[in-house]
């Protein structure tokens, strides 16, 4: 089976690596030949928003998928919808925070209060409705905390407006969450669904720093799986979908969804029966889904801005190192590691000491 992957970043690279044992042949499309994906698979070079290039890629493969969900709809117009997995509609909804939250509401998935902001008058009106603290975000193309500002006092409002005005915006209630959790689900081509256990995520500066899984809480698991099921069924979705939640006093509030494999699921490569990457490929290639049960207790640490020495990291037993083959730049995700332990307590103690060690080596954590 030939799988076209639009975007050749680290997600595409890990998809390709998961596909080889299944006989899946990846073909990337990206702007340069110097990408994490191109180091492990063949690439077409071209603009990932160019309809002719996407049509060329589609003609060479059996199914098309994404490493990056922000490909404009126009760019996909020349490809038969059935060849794109997950479906274009799920991609479109996830590209705009207003559409995403509106859909969540429609499907009975709770969200923070929100309002669209296209002018300063709208902002004042939305603040009157939602109050402070609040978060002002760009509706499209925001990721890793980019394009957003937290408004705590009236004095923050002008600065945030100065920074973000000119783009379609959304104002959201600031959620004083107990923790951030995510659920990764997968739906196969014949409608079978499977869910990984909940994962707990720690962000700073809007970027995911580390994930621990499984996060066990029966009541929250039930809520998360119900929300996931509603979204998967709504789209007749095929592939892996991630939903990020805030947990507040025993209740989940959805923040956003990603219609693709997700950073908070990297631990599944070593920490689950079947990785999110393999399950995404199984789903989009029409194969049976693999098991999603955890193997022990995992912690995944993102390497941001600077990669620690592999030799030093591997001194830690039961640690798996992933280098994405990127050049270093502040704020850039360059790799990750997953450490595994037999108990949650042992994992947490080792995670703490590893974070200290990587910080001493200058990692942004
Ligand atoms: P996002 O780009 O929406 O995933 O936001 C990145 C991170 O910013 C989240 O993981 C949270 O840590 C924080 N954040 C985003 N929206 C809110 C909100 N409405 N209330 C509190 N924290 C938020």
Image (cartoon, grey):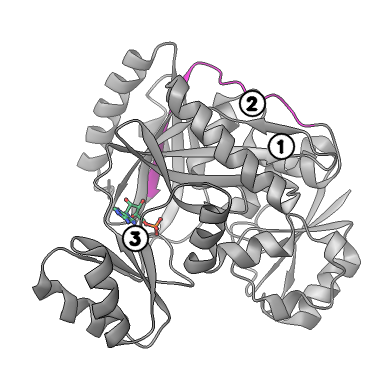
From which residue to which does the magenta span run? 289-303
Instruction: Please name which of the two marks, 3 or 2, marks the residue nearer to the observer.
Output: 2
Which residue occupies the extreme top position in the image?
A: 342
Q: Is residue 298 visible?
A: no
| Residue 202 x %, y % | 32, 41
- Distance, label 3 to label 2, CA atoms, is 31 Å
- Distance, label 3 to label 1, CA atoms, is 29 Å
Residue indicated by mark 1: 279
Pointer 3 with pointer 1, Cβ within 8 A: no
Front-most of residues 113 and 214: 113
Instruction: Please name which of the two marks, 3 or 1, marks the residue nearer to the observer.
Output: 1
Q: Is residue 264 above or below residue 2?
A: above
Which quadrant holds residue 355?
Answer: top left
Q: Is residue 287 left or right of residue 158?
A: right
Residue indicated by mark 3: 331
| Residue 112 x %, y % | 36, 54
Residue 35 located within the stretch drawn in magenta: no
Residue indicated by mark 2: 292
Q: Is residue 119 left or right of residue 282?
A: left
Pointer 3 with pointer 2, Cβ within 8 A: no
Which quadrant holds residue 42?
Answer: bottom right
């Amino acid at each position: 089976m030939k799988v076209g992957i639009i975007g050749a970043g680290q997600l595409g690279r890990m998809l390709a690596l998961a596909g080889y044992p299944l006989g899946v042949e990846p073909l990337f499309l990206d702007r340069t030949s110097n990408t994490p994906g191109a180091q492990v698979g063949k690439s077409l070079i071209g603009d990932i928003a160019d309809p002719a290039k996407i049509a060329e890629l589609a003609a060479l493969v059996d199914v098309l998928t994404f490493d990056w969900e922000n490909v404009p709809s126009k760019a996909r117009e020349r490809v038969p919808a059935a060849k794109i997995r997950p479906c274009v509609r799920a991609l479109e909804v996830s590209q705009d925070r207003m559409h995403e939250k509106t859909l969540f509401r429609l499907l009975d998935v709770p969200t923070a209060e929100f309002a669209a902001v296209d002018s300063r008058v709208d902002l004042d009106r939305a603040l009157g409705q939602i109050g402070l603290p609040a978060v002002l975000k760009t509706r499209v193309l925001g990721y890793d905390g980019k394009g957003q500002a937290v408004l705590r006092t009236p004095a923050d409002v002008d600065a945030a407006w100065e920074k973000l005005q000119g783009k379609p915006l959304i104002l959201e209630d600031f959620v004083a969450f107990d923790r951030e959790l995510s659920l990764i689900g997968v739906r196969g081509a014949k409608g079978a669904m499977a869910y990984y256990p909940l994962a707990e995520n720690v962000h700073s500066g809007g970027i995911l720093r580390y994930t621990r899984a499984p996060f066990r809480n029966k009541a929250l698991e039930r809520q998360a799986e119900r929300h996931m099921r509603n979204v998967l069924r709504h789209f007749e979705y095929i592939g892996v979908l991630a939903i990020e939640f805030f947990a507040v006093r025993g209740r989940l509030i959805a923040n956003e969804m990603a219609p693709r494999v997700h950073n908070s699921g990297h631990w599944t490569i070593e920490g689950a029966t079947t990785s999110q990457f393999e399950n995404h490929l199984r789903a989009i290639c029409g194969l049976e889904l693999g098991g999603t049960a955890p193997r022990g207790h995992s912690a995944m640490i993102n390497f941001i801005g600077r990669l620690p020495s592999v030799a030093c990291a591997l001194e830690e037993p039961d640690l798996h190192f992933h280098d994405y083959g990127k050049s270093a730049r502040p704020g850039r995700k360059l790799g990750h590691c997953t450490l595994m332990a037999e108990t949650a307590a042992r994992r947490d103690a080792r995670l703490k000491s590893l974070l200290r060690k990587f910080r001493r080596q200058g990692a942004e954590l």
